[in-house]
Image (cartoon, rainbow, N blue to C red):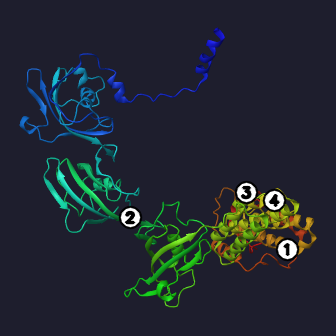
Amino acid sequence: MAIVNQQPQQDEQFAPQKKKKPPTEDEKRKEKIVAGSLMKALMRPGGGDSGPSDGDQVIYHCTIRTLDGVVVESTRSEHGGKGIPIRHVLGKSKMLLGLLEGIPSMLKGEVAMFKVKPQLHYSEDDCPISAPDGFPKDDELHFEIELIEFFKAKVVTEDLGVVKKVVREGQGWECPREPYEVKAWISAKTVTGKLIMSHTEGEPYFFTFGKSEVPKGLEMGIGTMVREEKAVIYVTSQYLTESPLMPVIEDSEVQFEVELVHFIQVRDVLGDGRLIKRRIRDGKGDFPMDCPLHDSLLHVHYKGTVLNEEKRVFYDTRVDNDGKPLDFCSGEGLVPEGFELCVRLMLPGEMALVTCPPDYAYDKFPRPSNVPEGAHIQWEIELLSFEMPKDWTGMDFKSIMNEAENIRNTGNRLFKEGKYELAKAKYEKVLREFNHVNPQDDDEGKVFADTRNLLYLNVAACYLKFGECRKSIETCNKVLEANPAHVKGLYRRGMAYMGNGDFDEARADFKMMIKVDKSTESDATAALLKLKQKEQEVEKKARKQFKGLFDKKPGEIAEVKANEDEGQVTSESQKDGAVQGDSSDETNSEDSHEDAPLIADRRGWFSYFWPTGSRIFSSLGLQRCTIL
């Protein structure tokens, strides 16, 4: 029996224990309360079933008296106060311990008298509130409290300078933010109820979020609202900044009644204020899950306008395309970059107004004849619908490889057009899909491996175009780790090594090409010749830079002349990077492999100060890239 009884104890011992939340500071303070230190007498009953709790904003009047009835302090005007009730958020505001314990026991509208010992008001150890000058902090006192109102509060700022009360729930989830355009009914009152201003008739007040067109605290509160929501926003003086809405007033607090009528989503797509998308009609679905973010077939209507004095419409699908929409695949560079960037952020059924600078419109894209060079463009775009890319799940191997080949060919076209980012995205899309493809036999395995290797090497070529030689090398290694004798992989990695200034590693890869495949000797020899030229250029530039360094007499300081031709090297490198077709890496020039050791001999002392293959030459250009 003892063993049987012991087992549950062992289970309890090793069962995971729920971690208790550490007590809050207010909970620790409440542990100081002892019997008889706080007494309550009901003077007027309140209404409702429950009192306030943590997170509620409480609004109350307070009059403090000595036990013989002398008023010490009061918020009421008849007792010398300003007539302004106190506003606290339970669990957030710094409060006297007696009130922190007593107010949650009250109902709305209730008036109660609390008899409070000194240790529960200003004589509390480590009291978070300093006693006013001359306050009898060591006396037992009566606190007369009238709980005017309490409600769940949205604390907008941690210092409680901006607090929101929801009067009516709104629709949706989205809140306005910079640089959205907002329409709202707004009125403002002092805490005593005096009307300061009102925009509740005619047209709602219109302002652009983030432009200081309303007081800072009001804008912060509206930034927590959704469409059609109605709220009261309490804003203290430090957040009542100057604005066109209302003058700065001296009151310590203003209560804004706000009804958020509508707001237009405005996106600064590039973050520099040049490409702006304004949503003028909502779409259907959830952002961004239901947007055509990736490769999709899109169906759109659009109207293009030249932003000049005439604001001339240069194309309208409903007029110039017989009412048919424009159909295009995203991610393929088929429409101007600014157009596609914005459409990818739209939901089906949405209509947007896009203002686009020339470099994202037609400066880098075939320009319609009736659009002037360098013109800013406005597109009114309606996303009718879109079709997601094909799901490869359940497709047979042949269909998968055909789909992969189509996407790879699209990537190759984009590469030749100089759209390297889009090309790289196409190659990487197929590589991601390949993670879920399982060839069933050796023949399928060979086709799959060959295609995957081509894709990796094309990604490496894109990295070379970006000047990211180290990433290009890492991508080539994914091919060469499985097949160290992969000739195209050796060639591509050798070019990346050369671009990174790793001349010895590049030479080793080019020589390995000849060793594993004699038919590549002409390509490898041309690459070695190019490598030799690069090394000689580096040596020549370095000699010129260090000329005279050791020509000074002992004791003299030699000044190193800055390289005046640095810009020329960069210019030449950029020319070397031009795309000139699929046979771009080939040359018939021959290279003398025995000449390489003589370079170090000719350098003499220089080799000790500037070793061959220094990473400092990572900006050296490449001859050309071949897409496979």
Q: Is disc 3 surrounded by few (<14), some (14 to 19) or many (20+) residues within 10 Å?
A: few
- Percent position of residue 369, x then y: 52, 91
Residue position marked by numbered label 3 in the rendering? 436
Name the kind of residue labelled 4 in the image.
Pro
Residue position marked by numbered label 2 in the rendering? 179
Q: Residue at x 25, y 48 (%)?
A: 234
Q: Are marks 4 and 1 in contact (CB under 8 Å)?
A: no
| Whether residue 309 is situated above or below residue 271 in the rendered picture | below
- Out of 527 and 591, give the one closest to the viewer: 527
Q: Earlier in the sequence, mark 2 or mark 1?
A: 2
Q: Mark 3 falls on what kind of element? A: loop
Residue 439: assigned label: 4
Mark 4 against mark 2, which lies toward the viewer?
Answer: 4
Going by the picture, which residue comes out furthest to the top?
A: 2
Lateral position of residue 399 relative to residue 109, left or right: right
Residue 204: assigned label: none
